Image: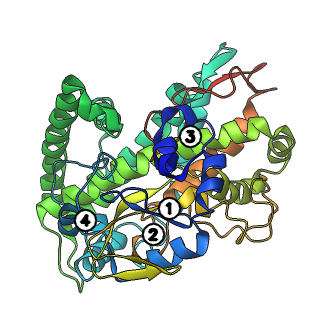
Amino acid sequence: MTQASLARQIVDYANRANPYPLYAELRKTPVLHEEEDGPYIISSYWDIESLLHDPRISSDAANLAAAGTDQYSQAEDTGLPPSFIRQDPPEHDRLRRIANSAFGPPHQPRRVYDMQGEMRAIVTELIDAFGDAREIDLVDRFAYPFPVTVICRLLGVPREDEPHFRSLVDPIVAGLDPRTGLDPVASKAARESRVQLGMYLSGLVNERMKEPRDDMLSDLANSQGPDGSMSMMEVLSTAVLLLIAGHETTVNLITNGMLTLLRHPEVLARLRKEPELSVRIVEELLRYEPPVQFVPQRTNITDIEVRGVTIPKGSRIWLVLAAGNRDPERFHDPDRFDPDRGDITHLGFGSGVHSCFGAPLARLETQIALSELARRLEDPRLVEDPPPYRENPLLRGPRHLNVAFGKLR
């Protein structure tokens, strides 16, 4: 294996099922720059953590465009103005504070927590729908519809509109696959769905401005706090961010989680008896099999030095979170899945000002999903290992996960 081919091997689908040996090789050169116009690839835990907190590292869409983009940096294009995760402080901070006032503490400290009962009801309904089947595709039958339904309820999408909402979401999520740009039909479908989704959400926002309800769209549309209010386009960008960025990562987290538990039946058996173990399992999953493998949407606004290597101003920077999560300089026996690990501080949700906005929701969804699947599926087992994976090297997870089981409990 040569260093010159390492980055290409990481994004090569042939290595999607198990990229971790490549990440171990990558960490031997913690700051890797293979080609003159290529990205600087950072792979050690402490370097990634430091750069995620470094104000000289920019996520601003304008700076990224100046640095030059690639297919992976385009993965979250929505057709709307950049959301706050594509902006730098102070504008990022203003928009994030407004968004958080509708999502969590201190203004809405129980919005996500109080959805637990509704989440459990959705999970029960989805598992009950397996009926007499003794083999199901966990992605299509469970991991995909669950977070979409939750986001609908969180935003305030009327239940009768949920099927239409999902029909708009499907092409957009498919558009996260980098290959979509090479398929004119799929690319057109994604663009049209973004436009239709924007129009649908703008209609809801206008309704909520006139008649606010107890939902997130109402709070975003009517916020009048110390940071002012969001414009209509900012509300829409934030809603689509929560929908797309949160949905795809949660699908992968649930699917990666069940795959890992089926590969570790002793942990699955423990979870069945100790549902509270789901909290630690999810944290270890975020370290061991993170749904976001690397973050390519970064550049530097001035020259910086990392481990003696000068990264010139305006360079593209890839932060390989999954490599940092298995860095032996940070974690003991990092390739072992161990929910009893004493310190599971990880990079699964990033860190710094751009840490994952939807982390509380994703954690709770996955804890409920995995504990209920463990409780209700009798003798579950993988039909195929490894399963087929999605093409996207950023958002890594199985495209299908066929699971056989005895019966429903």
Identify the residue under disc 2: 355
Q: Residue at x 15, y 52 (%)?
A: 207
Residue 308 left/right relative to 304: right
**Quick one: SS at disc 4?**
helix
Q: Which of pointers 1 and 2 indicates the residue nearer the eye?
A: 2
Count of numbered marks? 4
**Quick one: SS at disc 3?**
helix
Q: Amino acid at mark 1?
A: Ala
Asked if residue 6 is positioned above or below residue 376 in the image, the reply reads below
- Give the mark nearest the N terminus, 2 or 3: 3
Instruction: Tell me if label 3 and label 4 are in contact, CB under 8 Å.
Output: no
Indicate which disc residue 259 carries. Answer: none
> Residue 44: percent from the left, percent from the top?
59, 68
Identify the residue under disc 4: 220
Identify the residue under disc 1: 359
Residue 350 left/right relative to 304: right
- Decide which of 363, 159 is in the foreground and name it: 363
